Amino acid sequence: MISRNPKTKNGLGLTARELSKAMGEAVIRMPKAVVQSLENAAKQETDSLAQLHLRAILDNVLLADAENLPVCEDTGIQTVFVDAGREFPHLGELLSIIPEALRTATVSGPLRANAVNPFTGANSGDNLGHNAPAINLTMVDGDCATIHLLPKGGGSEQLSALWMLTPADGLKGLRREVLSHIQKAGGRPCPPVIVGIGVGGSADTCLKLAKRSLLRPLGTHSPDSDAAALEKELLEAINSLGVGPMGTGGRTTALAVNIEFAPRHPANFPVGLVMQCWCHRHSVIKLNRDGKVIL
Amino acid sequence: MPLDAKTAKALKTGDIVYLSGRIFTARDQAHIFMLRKGIPEGLITSGGAVYHCGPIVKDGPDGKYILSAGPTTSMRMESLEPGFLELSGARAVIGKGGMGPSTLEALKKHGAVYLTITGGVGASAMKQLGPIKNVHLLEELGPVEAVWEFDAQELGPLVVTMDSNGNSLHDDVSKATLANLERALARMK
């Protein structure tokens, strides 16, 4: 971790209060690409129940936006990704305001308190706790920092999976496991879903990659041609299953399949899957080297 | 609401309905608590509708209010629902994702139905539920898991996906998707 640059005079141009406001906004306003994708799905669906669910979803998204209400009552597991440039001078300060911002967004903002002690069952009431919030820090080139807010619902998270396949299983095994899993999951993860897949690395790496793949703008493909081809193939196969919105049938089971990868050990073929519900809430904040918000 | 036996019996899978009247929320913890200690005093469950929901509850100048109140995944209550239907006499279970064979059997036994509400429609459902009418087990279980009562105005659309005659739309879809899965896997060889 880089310590705060002592030469910085102005410090971070993002306060804990401003970040807490962004955390609140993230559960109220859906990314435009997600709404567009749901609208396209509604146009293409012929199944009457699929249309009913998609209309209810789109009406609800509009209502939430118009009246400043959380789209879904499950405002999620608060997951923050920080991609910090090695020359970004305000990292320590940025990391230090995240818990306070989250507490404010919960106690004085719209977030539901979702941090429950696994031993006592006690809800902390402010989304904070031992090892929470989950902050995923990645060091990148440059002098800027990007914060991704991904408040992710528990219903879809429950359908996450890890398969430690063998090299003999390989990509064929991946296709079989992923498709079988989505068939079995049915309506539980709130389809149409976004399927995040991590291939390779270790058990923890492939799940991290699977979650990270959800940060990609919806509808864009991996820059790697093999990964992109598998994304397209899997999306088509998933949508041939007929699970449909909310699992009551239809052609829209997934809006996207996003794949990230890393080299695998010669003995392993790990595949991690992170399911995201249709309510894919994702906000991005960018800071420049002066600590000013530029996005 | 309340739902009489004849009306519940007449509902068939695929029907689309809107529900008005008293409904109460209960998730895992409320089911477990009531199965152990009984229905709280003042909560009328017979002929009622139990909604699988953990709303966002905030404190305002006029007391507690709801910000968003969509459904939670019903399958988590699969092992608890048969006992709860027996205990409560509820005639409708509202949630998302569907439930399994134990609940389907219990629905048949008690002449009750399972109604699917679209997952994630927290804002719309909050409007349709209206203001909080009562709360039970708040101190014991906290705001997410407590039993909240509302006088709903046309909550829905709700799809009857499990009826009291042993039919489950979830089972039908599951059979069809399993056949589609085998075809998709064969194509991929």
Image (cartoon, coloured by chain):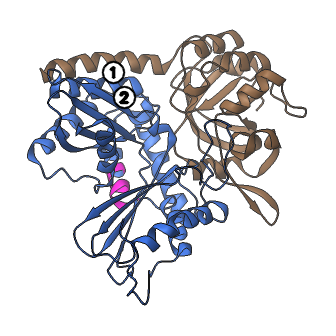
Chain colours: A blue, B brown
Q: Which residue is mark 2?
A: A243
Residue A264, position in %: x, y?
Answer: 18, 36
Mark 1, residue position: B177
- Which residue is at the far bottom? A9
Give yes or no for residue A35 being in the magenta stretch.
Answer: yes
Residue nearest the viewer, comparing A1 with A167: A1
Residue type at the position of mark 2 = Val
> Dividing the image into 4 quarters, which one contains the N terminus of chain B?
top right
Q: Tell me which residue sits at (32%, 67%) in the image.
A: A84
**Residue B94 x/y as whole percent:** 63, 31
Residue A228, x across and y down, in percent: 15, 45
The chain that hosts pointer 2 is: A
Q: Residue at x 60, y 47 (%)?
A: A115
Whether discs 1 and 2 lie on one chain: the answer is no
Q: Which residues are magenta?
A: A31-38
Q: Foreground residue, A189 or A141?
A: A141
Classified by dominant secondary structure, the portion drawn in magenta counts as helix
Along the viewing direction, whichever of A138 and B61 lies nearer the viewer: A138
Give left or right: position of A198 versus B144.
left
**Do we see residue A252 in this rendering?**
no
With respect to residue A124, does A45 lie above or below? above
Discs 1, 2 touching: Cβ within 8 Å: yes
Residue B120 magenta: no
